[in-house]
Image: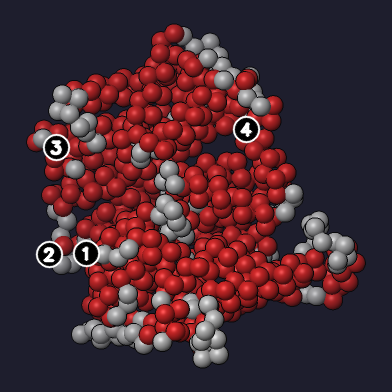
Amino acid sequence: MYDKLKGFEQIIFDTLSVILVLFYSYSAVIEPAATQYHRGIYVIITYVLVFLLYQSISPIMRILDYVLISLSIITIGYWMLNFEAINYRVGAETRVDMLIATIGVIISVELARRVVGNVFVFIGILMLFYGVYGAYMPDLVSHAGDSFPQLCTSIFYKSDGIFGIMANVLATYVVLFVLFGAFLEKCGAQKFFIDWPLAAVGHKTGGPAKVSVIASGLFGSISGSAIANTVSTGAFTIPMMKKAGFKPHVAGGIEPAASIGGMFMPPIMGAGGFIMAELTGLPYSKIMLIALFPAAMYFFSVFVMVHYEAKIYNLTGEKHKYSAREILKREWFYTIPLLVITVLMLTGYSPGYSAIAGLISCVVISWFRKETRIGLKGFIDASRTGTMNSLKIGATVGIIGIIIGILTFSGLVLTFADIMIEMAGGSLVLTILLIALASLVLGMGVPVTAAYLITAVVAVPALTHLGVNLIAAHMIVYWLSQDSNITPPVCIAAFAGATIAKANMWRTAFTSFKFAKFLYLGPFLFGYVPGFSLNGSYLDILKVMVLIVIVTYLFSYMFSGATFYKLKGIFADTYMPDLGMLGAVAGGITGFLIRPAALSGEKLPFNAVLSHGSNTALLDNILNPLARDSFNIMAVCTVIGLIIGIYTGYFIKSNNLTEEMKK
């Protein structure tokens, strides 16, 4: 897209990209900018670059692009220059204020349409319609409503609108870490992230697939995008898996399943981790610590599943010409940027300061090799790449501001939480399932980060009302917001993997869904096992971690298909998905029967069968915290096994196990 720009347009793009890097570097390291400039500069550059890069189809309509660029500068510039005056006259805005706000909101809708697509725009327009005509809605969701200009004024100028939390998070954290990722790739670190795991495990059982998992964890921890992770690492690992004997749809499915784990892996965790810090008020360093073990368990789960997938068909890779120790000894310095960021954030420095320090370290280590040196041209190239990568999420800032602004304006945030609790009947399991469904549907039309923020605003209050601690509630929503990347019907990361593997998209999507099973187990662990989110004493947390490692291994082994394969001699003529579903149902029933003994304070529909009060009183006296957590984990695993078994039972053929058993 950049190549299609005219010469002077490329100069404008590069100039604004470098300004973005320098301005936010200065703001993060030397002197923070005032609120209106801190958020406004990012938004105005994003709007200008989007309309510059995402051109109208017709050359004549290119004039409209420049009109929109001019209007973006005028409207956002007006907000920045009149920031204090507008705040003083809240509720008494002038006609000019309203006109500027109305134009700004309309431009934001068009911006999102060009980058994200029509579905996201439809949601935004629907919310605007709801904001204006709220008085005519059903009583459950009705509100006073307002005129369109007044509504736009509220959205454009108030702190929960277009220049609200999303703009602040993007300007404070995301743009800096996206730029850091671009500089890290430019300095040559990405090759190390593939070569080192290739030398370490590439020659073992399922070696190429294990390389995919490890490389995705390393690169995904700083890329901040499951799709970018899939495309960048998958371009190398997917052909390597196919060469080792993995079927195309399996190779294409493993990579996106591993890639979404990068969204949970510190130090960066995509944009979601920074939004979480902003919403919870917790230091980002604490969120990093809480996220580390669950992320490790996700990758461990995928690793175990690909190991047994390869073991079934006896698939191994080729030995690398260098050992892992030799590569680490020769290229260890590529780990410096990640170490710099992690150490600085854990010692109390701001994420922005840490990102700039990491970026500088990328420039320094690039000079260790002649072919990777970042000079002036390299600096401009990396700035351009980072800025282009940030536009996809930056273009959502306006629509997200519209959605959150109207949710707040209408009071639907609190109403929605009550509705969700009522629909779930006070059950945490059903509430989590409703959130999973909502995030999946929302994720079909909006980026996963936007899906997390929108869902968190309405769903976290419901979870906390049911007794889940705040950070665990956000983790539940954040994990589930990633499911649209690999869960059919809309699963862009999986489709990207299928494209590289030259495989059937649907088979690849269901295979990716199979390998990412822990994505659905994790939220239940956050909800029912406090130690999973580091809530508890050190001893209890340690016990829970050991137990979860064991459960994760068993869970992954069960869903890898290895169990079915071993039973082929006994049930040669039986349709294995039916057995899988039957086992999941039995496990689900068992899990629900022990839940009254494991959980206290929750009303269950089968109290007539087991007296919740009497069992709890008895067990509270004889079971230690580890035992109660054991019951929780067992219940969670069996319930989630039931759900996933029913959902995927008839798609186990994607693994070709059924055909193998019939031979």
- Position of residue 353 measured from the top left corner of the image (x, y, whole percent): 38, 50
The single residue placed furthest to the left in the displayed view is: 7
Q: Quadrant of the N terminus?
A: top left
- Position of residue 551 measured from the top left corner of the image (x, y, whole percent): 60, 76
Depth check, mark 1 against mark 3: the one in front is: 3
Distance CA(mark 1)–CA(mark 2): 9 Å
Q: Which residue is mark 4?
A: 412
Q: Which residue is mark 1?
A: 188
Please say if 551 is above or below 448: below
Residue beneath the point at 41% across and 87% down: 663
Q: Amino acid at mark 2?
A: Glu
Q: Which residue is mark 2?
A: 371
Badge 3 marks a residue whose secondary structure is: loop
Q: Amino acid at mark 1?
A: Gly
164 or 399: nearer the viewer: 399
The disc at residue 5 is 3
The single residue placed furthest to the front in the displayed view is: 573
**Earlier along the polypeptide chain: callout 2 or callout 4?**
2
Please say if 66 is above or below 455: above
**Earlier along the polypeptide chain: callout 3 or callout 4?**
3
**Earlier along the polypeptide chain: callout 3 or callout 2?**
3
Left or right: where does residue 323 sit relative to residue 533?
A: left
The residue carrying pointer 1 sits among few (fewer than 14), some (14 to 19) or many (20 or more) residues within 10 Å by Cα, namely some
Distance CA(mark 1)–CA(mark 3): 27 Å
